[in-house]
Image (cartoon, grey):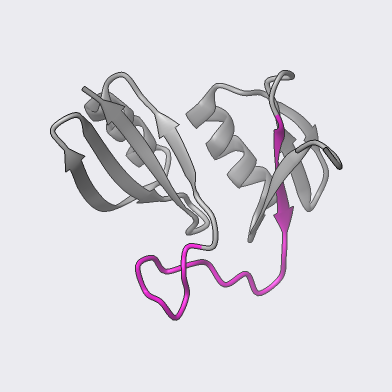
Amino acid sequence: MIGHLRAVTLDCPDANALADFYSALLGWPVTKREADWAQISDGTRPAIDFQQVEDHRPPAWPDPERPQQAHFEIGVEDIEAAQERVLAMGAELLAVVEEDSANLYRVYADPAGHPFCLEFTR
């Protein structure tokens, strides 16, 4: 092993707003805030950092001209309730994918345009 994963960092137009979105989505507290950078962490897993950049150009999944770049897969117990909450927080539904009779995925864009999935396993 060369090292360990400390954090995943997402570029975005408003670091603190996106940190608040993922804090509410995952239940992790915002542990650090600066004017153009923020972090959420539950203290046991790698953190998620949010880095504010000028002229942020979000992915436009599934457009190959602006691919998703990276995404989170978030397991949920009640996909309908989870969807209601993420939409109320500013997410946008992009696609519903039923992989097989046991797995249902819904693809969303966070408020900065990054795709993420809610995954329900029956």
Q: Quadrant of residue 53?
A: bottom right
Residue drawn at (44%, 81%), measured in percent from left and top? 65
Marks counted in the figure total: 0
Residue drawn at (82%, 38%), measured in percent from left and top? 1
Residue at the limit of the structure toward the front, as seen here: 1
Q: Compare residues 97 and 2 and report the one nearer the observer.
A: 2
Residue drawn at (80%, 33%), measured in percent from left and top? 32
**Measured along the vertical axis of the image, is residue 79 above or below residue 11?**
above
Image position, residue 79 (x, y; %): 26, 28
Residue drawn at (19%, 29%), measured in percent from left and top? 102
**Measured along the vertical axis of the image, is residue 122 above or below residue 51?**
above
Q: Compare residues 74 and 93 and report the one nearer the observer.
A: 74
The C terminus sits in image quarter: top left
Is residue 60 magenta-colored? Answer: yes
* In-image side of 103 versus 67 (left or right): left
Q: Main secondary structure of the magenta part?
A: loop
Magenta range: 46-68
Image position, residue 110 (x, y; %): 46, 49
Is residue 101 magenta-colored? Answer: no
Residue at the limit of the structure toward the right, as seen here: 2
Image position, residue 52 (x, y; %): 72, 58
Image position, residue 18 (x, y; %): 59, 45
